[in-house]
Amino acid sequence: MKPNGITKVEIQPEDSIHLMPVVWETQTGIIPPDINPQLTVTQNGESIDQFAPWPMLSQPMGFHFGDNAQLQGDGTYTVEVSIGGPSTRRTGSLAENQGNTSFTFEFEFSESTLNEISYTDIPDDKEGTKGAVDLMDMEMLPDSQVPTPDALPGNVRGSETSGDAKFVVTVLEDASRFGGDEEQKYLAVSPRTPYNRTMLPMMSLSATLQRDGTSEFDGILQATIDPDLRYHYGTTVADIQTGDELTITVDSPPQTARHEGYETAFVDMPDVQVTL
Amino acid sequence: MNRRDVLRVVGSTSLVGLAGCTGLFETRSAQAPPLPENRPNAVYYPTHYEGMKMPGMKEQGGYRCASRIRMRTGSG
């Protein structure tokens, strides 16, 4: 058995599954990328596998956590999903959001169940060409999309592309919800994948704001989860005027694993320049 | 070395080093065909995609959690 390291049981490849815990905030349906789920798989009270799944970006599944679990054949298994406390700033009604809880599932595993899982081939003349598979319809599950530019709060001032990601810039008139005051503005940058509008979390972004050759802001854009803006990067600024030059620097691209079709994008990400 | 070990090693190095090393960085199903040739430096259609099963959903402390399963992925 794996846990005590004495007896080794050969695991058949087909006995392993890819486990994906999807955790979301009940009121908003937002899937927080910062709660680091830990999975413990047991069978009849005995530990089978334990791991912290990786954050991943996939076209049909959007942002999710997932990793392989090594099971020991057909049977009933228990999976405990524990989530940690938030490490990304939460604003508005999410500010009280605590995390630190756990969920327990029982599931029946059989190889025949795995055989029911669909496998869709993409035609040869389409694979490798620009585009993306649609997000899977996940019935009652929320998705990891961010709002369309029209649906973003504030005044959308422009958008630009870098590394095939689209960065939408919006300005909110009142920064008090974001640690500023009513007189200040909140500058929010909402990056998303093309085609599917999946959020691009776990980046490090910074920005400069120039007005008539003078720097009005030079600093980091803080990753933030807001009920309306959802996952975004932002900062408070004293003022924004028409014609201000915003330069966004991607200090590090999304620190997530990528499924096929996303591994060549969102890697080399040059500066994004938007005239507000 | 299994996939998780590989990813752990990768996780401690810089992302820049990964760009040319997609086999470690991306996750692919064990039954996946070879990657398409001439992949663009952009989002592209993969060779295939897989469905999943959802064994259950739970609610606790302001969060809901659903567990999903899929065929296992290999290191490609």
Image (cartoon, coloured by chain):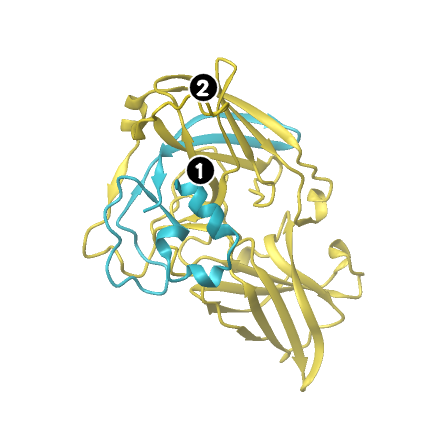
Secondary structure category for the residue under label 2: strand
Disc 2 target residue: A77
Residue type, numbered disc 2: Tyr
Residue position for label 1: A67
SS class, disc 1: strand
Q: Nearer the viewer, residue A252 or A180?
A: A252
Residue A140, given in percent of the width and then of the height, sits at 47, 32
Residue A139 spot, x, y in % from top left? 43, 34
Amino acid carrying mark 1 in the image:
Asp
- Disc 2 and disc 1 on one polypeptide chain: yes
Residue A276 on image: x %, y %: 60, 75
- Most distant residue in the bottom direction: A213
The picture's colour for chain A is yellow
Work out whether residue B52 can be spotted. Answer: no
The x, y position of residue B66, in whole percent, is 50, 30
Using the image as rendered, state which of residue A188 and residue A265 is in the foreground: A265
Tell me: residue A218, above or below residue A197.
Answer: below
Report crowding for label 2: few under 14, some 14 to 19, many 20 or more residues within 10 A (C-alpha): many
In the image, residue A26 sits, relative to residue A172, either above or below, namely: above
The chain letter for the residue carrying disc 1 is A
Tally of marks = 2
Image colour assigned to chain B:
cyan
